[in-house]
Amino acid sequence: MVEMLDRGIGSFARIPPLPPFTTPEELVADALPLLDPPSRITVTEAAVRHMRVNLGGRWSSYDPDITPYMIEPQDVTQSRRFKGVILVGPSQCGKTQLLISVSAHAIMCAPGPVQLIHMTKTDADAWVEEKLDPAIANSPALSDRLGKGRDDSTFSRKRFQGVRMTIGYPVANQLSSRSQRLVLLTDYDHMPQRLGPKDAPEGSPFSMAIMRIRTFMSRGCVVAESTPAFPVDGSKPKPSPLLEPHRFPEVKEGIIPLYNEGTRGRWYWECPGCADLFEPTFDRLDYDRELDPGDAGEKAVMVCPHCGLVIEHREKVELNRRAAAGHGGWLHEGRSVDENGRRRLVRINDPELRNVSYASYALNGVVAAFASWAELVERHEIARRSFEMSGDDKGLSQSFYTDLGQPYLRPGEDDDDVLTVEILRNRAVQIDKRIAPDWARFVVTCVDVQGNRFEVTVMAFGAEGERIIIDRFAIHQPPDAAPRARGDDGKYRAVDPGRYAEDAEALTELADQVYPVDGQNWGLKPVAVVIDFNGPKGWSDNAEKFWRKRARAGKGGRFYLSIGRGGFQQRDRVWHEAPERASNGKRARGIKLLNMAVDRLKDSVAAALEREATRINAQHTPCWMDVEHMAELIAEQRGDKGWVKKPGMQRNETFDHSVQALAMAEHLGMNRVNWEAPPAWCLSGLLNPNAVEIARPNDADSAREVPAVPAKPRAISFLRRR
């Protein structure tokens, strides 16, 4: 640095030193490569000549045999026939390397502006620092072309000789008012799918990227790669396996619709035994589902669908290389059908290829170079078994998206026999109302708060999560001690929970209600009463007062206030913690809420209602239940962002109660119980602290503890017993 001095004011400026002297001859020599015509070589050939890649921590020359399935997609980016190249695949299969290879070809062989769009600014900066900059620094040919000026290499821009590469993120101004020859979109499904103002969106990132390459006409190309991240729309018809063998089921947004609009290429192997071609998919892996996930994965093999030949995992590398050499490889849907009515499959350069604007590719996870079949099977089996146990499909959907690179359809959503009231009635268990089954271990009472009543459901749980509703009623009348509980005519007014805090006292005796166990001389009191914290205006304040009063009486552990949290991406399914602020705006002290990830729990309840062949985590419906309450169990349907009421359905309290009961059971630790040696609260018999000896078995009216003092008149009006 050079320091400028002035006698009057002293040191006043520090400027960098001048660059070294450069002769005109050196400037001309540096610019001469820009006058060369574009090199007539493919992206793969350019990558082999000029690019180095990181393999296991060691930088070496690019080897196309490591990911041979990337050769065609990256070479097609230079085709003048297609405006875009779409690649759907699992994580860690080499998709990101595709973008660097295409960029390297533009830098070394076909100069032109390049733009890369990442998910967010933070992710774009991380990609530059962790992937792009090391690739440039370790590839001498690329590094020599990079400008040496201060602003030639930043997080948002790279200036090479004749090439400007910009790195951005998906906002409207990044994809507006610019002309680009190449636009590269990475992790497309994790971008916002609508850019611009919410009230007037400008379009999707892909559609806006297509507008940016118009100036370059047939030389322009948009490349989009991603793992899928959006579920299948189960309401849409399935594609025909004969006429559209490579088409994915309908997905509303993301990269799958783009793939379906393109040539629909899939990767094929040639069987070493019969020489017939087949697509290697996860469904064609053969393993024993009864084994532990790790053992099942170690023994997984591929089976040829034509001759039944068993293919070991160690043969995958050679089969991929043979496929790239012409013994299989990428096959796309053609225009015509054969004599059997099947769509013909053709190569990308075949005249019979469908006349579309995009070359699209879908790679199954079993083909990926960096994933073993043992790992895929182990993770998939763990996720599948978790779903079957809990009904929570978060892990299973992730297995499809990131491990297999396929769109996900929740099991059961494509079944023809959608759950109906008639099906529930036909499956109903024969048991009397207010009687717990002989397998019951504990009981949970759930309360939903409405403007003029309390809706109550009682659920009995057995071992392994088996459960059944044993009582369902509404509390319409306030207790006698409530303000103006009775009018001048002696009649009760309706419950008004938001206005009168005293009305909540009608819930007090729910914790002491005893439910006889079928055929036994004992019954069960609820292990907990779960009350909805949300409700009519004013109820949250009154609910907090009610709970604090129970806590002062030493019964705070029997009553819980629950609150629902929407969305499928909640951190946990259930968590019990104090709110950041109480209902009056002050900091909450001494009170905790049972937080419920309601959409994930509703997945579990819906799955439990479908379980007929197993008792594990099954929710049964009793024969005495009203049709209206059965309808409430199926009043909602699963959407992309959460569960919503079906058109025309108004009531869903029983479904919400089932969520509350499951949340309470999971909070107590039901999923962690060793049922061969269970804790006291879920024992069978009088050793259970909530078990009460009764005088007459199966008599719900006599099933209550003898009170120490005369009991007050009951304030609960039960629904008519069926």
Image (cartoon, rainbow, N blue to C red):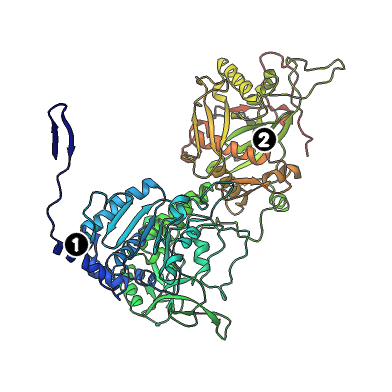
Q: Amino acid at mark 1?
A: Pro
Q: Is residue 620 above or below residue 180?
A: above
Could you tell me which residue is drawn at 21 percent across and 54 percent down? 148
Report the residue marked by disc 1: 140
Q: Residues within 10 Å of mark 2 (few under 14, many from 20)?
A: many
Is residue 477 shown left or right of residue 300?
right
Can the viewer see residue 683 in this picture? Answer: no
Is residue 642 shown left or right of residue 33?
right
Report the residue marked by disc 2: 457
User: In this view of the protein, which residue sits in the foreground, 144 or 469?
Assistant: 144
The quarter of the picture where residue 436 lies is: top right
The quarter of the picture where residue 268 lies is: bottom left
Q: Secondary structure at mark 1?
A: helix
User: In this view of the protein, which residue sits in the foreground, 716 or 397?
Assistant: 397
Is residue 669 shown left or right of residue 108?
right
Q: Is residue 442 above or below residue 268?
A: above
Q: For marks 2 and 1, give the CA distance.
A: 71 Å
Could you tell me which residue is drawn at 55 percent across and 80 percent down? 342
Q: Residues within 10 Å of mark 1 (few under 14, many from 20)?
A: some
Label 2 close to label 1 by CB (< 8 Å): no
Q: Secondary structure at mark 2?
A: strand
Q: Quadrant of the N terminus?
A: top left
Q: Earlier in the sequence, mark 2 or mark 1?
A: 1
Going by the picture, which residue comes out furthest to the bottom? Answer: 339
User: In this view of the protein, which residue sits in the foreground, 29 or 96?
Assistant: 29
Q: Which mark is residue 609?
A: none
Q: Position of residue 420 (x, y in %)?
A: 70, 52
Q: Position of residue 261 (x, y in %)?
A: 53, 68
Could you tell me which residue is drawn at 62 percent across and 52 percent down? 610
Q: Amino acid at mark 2?
A: Thr
Q: Position of residue 336 (x, y in %)?
A: 55, 82
Q: Position of residue 677 (x, y in %)?
A: 46, 37
